[in-house]
Image: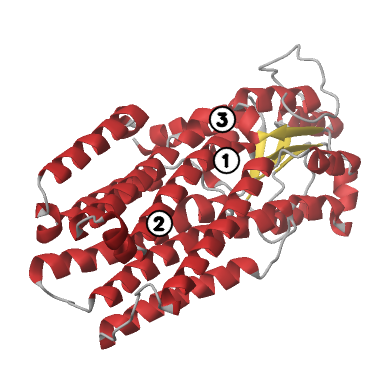
Amino acid sequence: MPIELVFYNIYMDSPKAILLVEDDRFLAMLMKSRLEKAGFGVTPASDGSEALDFLKSRKFDLLILDLVLPQISGFELLEHAEARAPLAITPVMVLSNLAQESDAAKVIALGVKKYLIKSRVSTEEVVRIADALIGVIEPALAGTPAPTAGFGMA
Amino acid sequence: MLMSKILNIKTILAANILIFAIVEASGSYFMDSGYIHAIALAYIVLAFIALAQRPLEDVFLKRFLSIAPSAALLLFAGSHSIEFVRMKFGFLVLPTDTTIVNILNLHIAGLLAIVSAAWFVLNAYARRGPRYLPWLLAAVAGGAIVLTLGLLATGANVSLDPHSPILYGYLLGLVAVLAVGFVALWKLRKILPILKIFVDYFFIAFLFIAFAVLTVLFHSALQSMLGLPDYQILYISHFALYLSLSFLFLTSTRLSSMSPLYKEAEEFMAAETV
């Protein structure tokens, strides 16, 4: 088998990689479980600093980001010089408790694709939006239209 | 979860009314025996259990939702344990006003712990507001605890008569704590929808505890103006405290019920621990 095809098969068999940045360990465990069940590969990070290290060391297909985090906040991460290059090619979905439109507007201006408020969504909606943004190899929830950048619920 | 289902607002209010009726029907028995404080301790234990069941583990929010209320409950428990031991076994007997100052100190320190945490969360989420305020409030709470320990150790006499500046100092302090607390809670309610119903219940708990503290602070005035017996004032302040702790307990059920995500997290963690 040609080497290109081997790499192609490895790539195609690998689940789409999500970096999940969430400091609430209960929510992180829940989200990781649900996303993995849907076919994504999930790397959890509990603060902005850890997330930055991951972003510098490998490529992710999607970043799910909480905004209020220890060490480096989500806002700071989005503006961080060292995160600029990886974030230029990685779509970002924010999942935060912050509900003020000014917060959503600020991060959407920084390139965030979707802004979700934790008190208004379920994991099912998060999985559906992740799938619409990047898709999975074996689509669990195919047929969902791709979301546009927006504020509020799914 | 089962406890939350059984102990809803209706059953808790009914239980409170039943307890009030039993205590009132007994005359001064619950004061003389110290059991009025034992009941307070039972409420505190119940509120502790509720706090431990919260599905939220956010690094910032848990300081306001779990750690600070737990610290406040510990301080309230300390105050009522001292009172129970004093009434039941005759230990730690101090002059009346000194005892009242100790009760005030520990309850105000508890309120300060919660208000300090509320400002801490607000600073983190709103990314504005005075950064020093949570630390200042925590330092004042620490001062109140140190003062209580000092009074317990020395048994110094403190006057709370209507002409004493100490009385008005406490009143001003309490008003300041309430004002700073309400501003923090109001702002939190605005920027964090997840806390909306929680904060509403918290407001009520806060008001009841402030009423309990005021009743203790003005016990002499209430006695002379309304002609209420000593035990009745103690009961009124404790009934307010019981209601406050009841609402603090009820806040535990408010987070998961208002957000599908946190509801899922609660169920997920429950399934994981089985």
- Crowd rating for badge 2 (residues with CA inside 10 Å; few <14, some 14–19, many 20+): many
Q: Amino acid at mark 1?
A: Leu
Q: Chain of mark 2?
A: B
Nearest-to-viewer mark from 3 and 1 = 1
Q: Give me the C-alpha separation between circle 3 and circle 1.
A: 10 Å
- Seen at 42% across and 62% down, the residue is B110
> What quarter of the picture does the C terminus of chain A occupy?
top right
Residue B76 higher or lower than A58, as above or below? below
Q: Chain of mark 3?
A: B
State the residue position of label 3.
B259
> What quarter of the picture does the N terminus of chain A occupy?
top right
Q: Amino acid at mark 3?
A: Ser
Residue B36 higher or lower than B220, as above or below? above
- Crowd rating for badge 1 (residues with CA inside 10 Å; few <14, some 14–19, many 20+): many
| Numbered disc 2: secondary structure | helix
Q: How is the image coloured?
A: secondary structure
- Left or right: A31 with respect to A136? left
Q: Which of the pair B256/B214 is nearer the observer?
A: B214
State the residue position of label 2.
B70
State the residue position of label 1.
B195
